Amino acid sequence: MYGLVLKNICKSFNSTVAVSNLSLSVPSGKIYGLLGPNGAGKTTTIRMVMNIIRPDSGEIEVLGEPAGESTKDRIGFLPEERGLYQSMSVRDVLLFLAEIKNLKRSDTGPLIVEWLERMGLSETIDKKVQTLSKGMQQKLQFISVLIHEPDLIILDEPFSGLDPVNVELIKDIIMEEKRKGRTIIFSTHVMEQAEKLCDHITLINKGEKVLDGPLFEIKAKFGRNSVIAEIDGDAREFETLDDVERISDFNKYVEFKLTRGGDSQRLLHALAEKTTVNRFEVVEPSLHDIFIDVVRGGDKRGVEDA
């Protein structure tokens, strides 16, 4: 069973190709990352799923049915650009958005109280939306996505504007929805968030799919080609070593991306000859590194097979 299936979707705006021959299958009950740099075609793809715009060609199935107006009520959609009515009260905007999804007002009232309490927004219920901070509005819109208990949840940059405490709150709710069997599509260009949450990913770049599959399989195909080290001194002096393709300095530690065929033991000896090595660990590449390599075209291992 798939929560969403795209078959050879294409979309152009005049001479600009936004999405090119995109196919993917989102397993039901999983968190699926739709990833890519800004301008890759993620938002255009989501708008086609939501029937906001139509594809030029191809087919879209939502929860086993052709995408259209009839499937919208089964989707909860959090757009990157917020769409709350600023002059309405919090209560009224949630009532209105729930009504659009065919919830009765008599059923929605208690749900609003419950959700606002969960989000720490109880005191805002009669305030106008425009008086709320950006983070509060983000949580309010998140409530509007889930209040009708959708089967498919699409989140476009859901953590935007949130502090770490509220990021954790939203993350916990996302995991709760997964445990209920919901299918969740998580669209972002922040790889650290995707790596922590997603079961499967599709990486698109310039409208085309360049990686697709379970996250653990994709990382395995790229191999254990990174080294995390804690060393004394400036890591930049090791950038020219034959085994090193790239260095990322994270202040507390350094991540060395090895060249294809690079030898971690040679790197260790080279480091030990010039500095004190307090930590040295060979690891799988992060999704961040895979993203950079694929988008820049610097590393194609596993791309064709993923």
Image: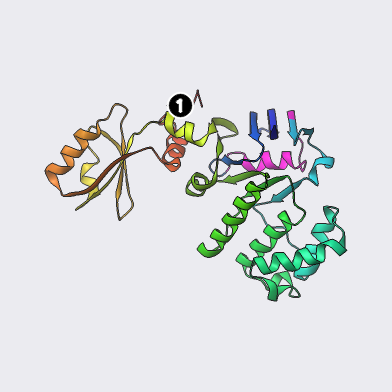
Q: Residue furthest left?
A: 273
Q: Is residue 53 magenta?
A: yes
Q: Quadrant of residue 23?
A: top right
- 119 vs 271, nearest the viewer: 119
Q: Amino acid at mark 1?
A: Gly
Residue drawn 33% across the image and 52% down it: 250
Residue drawn 80% across the image and 58% down it: 97
Q: Quadrant of residue 243?
A: top left
Coloring applied to the structure? rainbow
- Name the residue carrying label 1: 302
Whether 121 is drawn above or below 211: the answer is below
Quick check: 291 left or right of 246? right
Q: Is residue 88 visible?
A: no
Disc 1 crowd, CA 10 A, few/some/many (<14, 14-19, 20+): some
Residue 221: image location, x then y, percent: 43, 28
Residue stretch rendered in magenta on the structure = 39-59
Residue 128: image location, x then y, percent: 74, 73
Quick check: 4 left or right of 279? right
Residue drawn 24% across the image and 31% down it: 263
Q: Quadrant of residue 269?
A: top left
Q: Is residue 64 magenta?
A: no
Q: Residue furthest top?
A: 305
SS at circle 1: loop
Residue 156: image location, x then y, percent: 63, 49
Residue 141: image location, x then y, percent: 69, 59
Residue drawn 20% across the image and 39% down it: 268
Quick check: 87 left or right of 162? right
